[in-house]
Image (tube, helix red, strand yellow):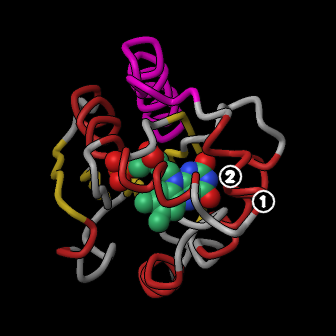
């Protein structure tokens, strides 16, 4: 059994989740930025992680998922977002990632809050877009993912690995 953990991360949140997942895998394993992954062909299971950009995967990420996720390869998705997990729109973000990965056999999905970068928050605050301004105002993502969320990511890794051996 060979497992890949691949991630995209601009400010380190998704990387932190990736490393937590990786630490829980008791099998032959590799971790790397997803842009270094040519194909999932060599892996029995691939954990693929991304930040949410613009209410889902950005264009590049969507294209990457569509390219990698094929032939029913087993994939577990993990996603970070600045919105709180309880925000209804988060379900839609994750659904969009799943849609882009639908050529794979999606064995699990995990998402958690990740701190919004300060520069982005400033841009959102002065945006002409009312929703962006409102989202910046209610942002409570500072310090995320915290230890509680990282433990949930570890539990997700264990649960997903459990499904593989079942
Ligand atoms: C360009 C851009 C767009 C974003 N769009 C959203 C969004 O639509 N919803 C959301 O909850 N967070 C959004 N975020 C916040 C990130 O998804 C979040 O901070 C994430 O944890 C960053 O992960 P990283 O540190 O691995 O890059 C956005 C961030 C950036 C930079």
Q: Horizontal placement of 26 versus 155: left or right?
A: left
Which secondary structure type mostly characterizes the magenta part of the structure?
A: helix
Check the picture and name the quadrant holding the C terminus: top right
Q: Secondary structure at mark 1?
A: helix
Q: Is residue 145 magenta?
A: yes
Q: Is residue 84 above or below residue 62?
A: above
The answer to whether mark 2 and mark 1 are in CB contact below 8 A is yes
- The one nearer the camera, 108 or 148, is 148
The location of residue 57, given as percent across then percent down, is 56, 69
Q: Which residue is mark 2?
A: 133
- Taking the view exactly as shown, the residue that stands out farthest to the right is 88
- The one nearer the camera, 165 or 36, is 36
| Residue that appears at 57% across and 40% down | 111
Q: Horizontal placement of 35 versus 120: left or right?
A: left
The location of residue 131, given as percent across then percent down, is 77, 56
Q: Secondary structure at mark 2?
A: helix
Q: Which residue is mark 1?
A: 130
Q: Is residue 11 magenta?
A: no
Residue range in magenta is 140-166
- The one nearer the camera, 119 or 88, is 119
| Residue that appears at 29% across and 29% down | 20
| Residue that appears at 43% across and 35% down | 161
């Amino acid at each position: 059994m060979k497992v890949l953990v691949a991630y995209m991360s601009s400010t380190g949140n998704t990387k932190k989740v990736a490393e937590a997942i990786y630490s829980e895998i008791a099998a032959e394993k590799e971790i790397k930025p997803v842009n270094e992954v040519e194909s999932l062909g060599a892996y029995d299971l691939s954990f693929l992680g991304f930040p949410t950009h613009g209410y889902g995967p950005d264009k590049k990420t969507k294209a990457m998922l569509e390219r990698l996720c094929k032939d029913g390869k087993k994939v577990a998705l993990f996603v970070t977002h600045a919105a709180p997990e309880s925000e209804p729109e988060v379900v839609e973000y994750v659904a969009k990632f799943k849609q882009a990965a639908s050529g794979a056999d999606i064995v699990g999905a995990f998402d958690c809050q990740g701190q919004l970068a300060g520069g982005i928050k400033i841009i959102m605050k002065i945006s002409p877009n009312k929703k962006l301004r409102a989202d910046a105002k209610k942002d409570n993502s500072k310090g995320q993912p915290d230890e509680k969320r990282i433990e949930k990511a570890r539990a997700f890794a264990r649960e997903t690995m459990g499904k593989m051996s079942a």
